[in-house]
Amino acid sequence: MKNMNDTLKDLLFGIVISAVIVSIIGMMLTDNKVTYLLGVLLGTVIAIMLVIHLNATISKALDMTAEGATRYTKKMAILRIIIMGCAVVIALTFSEVFSLVGTILGILGLKFSAYLQPLTNKFITKKIF
C-alpha cells in the first residue's frame, strides 16, 4: 500500500507540473488569458479529484472478491467518465468563464502525469518526499 501512496504522490505532482507547463504555453498563445487559466484550473482540479478517486477505488477493490472488484471498478470508471463529462459541460455552459480547451488540457494532465510517473518518481518525488 505504501507503493500506491508513492504513486499517488507522483501522479499529483505530475498533474500540477503539467498544469503549470500547459498554462505557461497557453498564456502565450491565447488572447483571453484569464478564461484559459480558469479552464486549466478547473481541469486540473478535476484531474486531481479523479486520481484520488482512482486510488480509493483500487484500495477498496483489493479487499473484494475478483467478481466484486471487477464490477466495482467498472462502476467507478463510469463515474469518473461522468465527472469528466460534467466538467466539459460546465466549461461549455460557462464559456465566458472557463475555456473548453484549457479545461480539457487540465483534465489531460492526468494522462501526462501517468506517462511521466516513472521519471517524476525517479528524479523528483523520491528526493522531495
Image: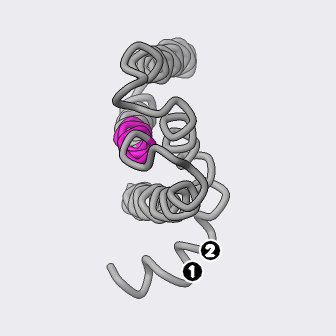
x, y percentage for residue 90?
Answer: 39, 18
Q: Do tag 1 and tag 2 residues touch (Cβ < 8 Å)? A: yes
x, y percentage for residue 107?
Answer: 51, 39
Instruction: Answer above or below: position of 39 versus 100.
Output: below
Overall secondary structure of the magenta section:
helix
x, y percentage for residue 59?
Answer: 38, 38
Reply yes or no: does residue 110 show up in magenta: no
- According to the image, label 2 marks what residue? 119
**Residue range (magenta):** 36-47
Which residue is at the front of the view, 61 or 124?
Answer: 124
Reply yes or no: does residue 43 show up in magenta: yes
* Residue lying furthest front: 31
Q: Residue at x 36, y 46 (%)?
A: 34
Looking at the rendered structure, the secondary structure element under dot 1 is helix
The part of the image, by quadrant, that contains residue 93 is: top left
**In this picture, residue 47 sits left or right of residue 116:** left
Tell me if residue 68 can be seen.
Answer: no
- Quadrant housing the C terminus: bottom left
Which residue is at the front of the view, 101 or 64?
Answer: 101
The part of the image, by quadrant, that contains residue 25 is: bottom right
Q: Residue at x 56, y 43 (%)?
A: 105
Number of the label disc, if any, that sits on residue 122: 1
x, y percentage for residue 99?
Answer: 47, 33
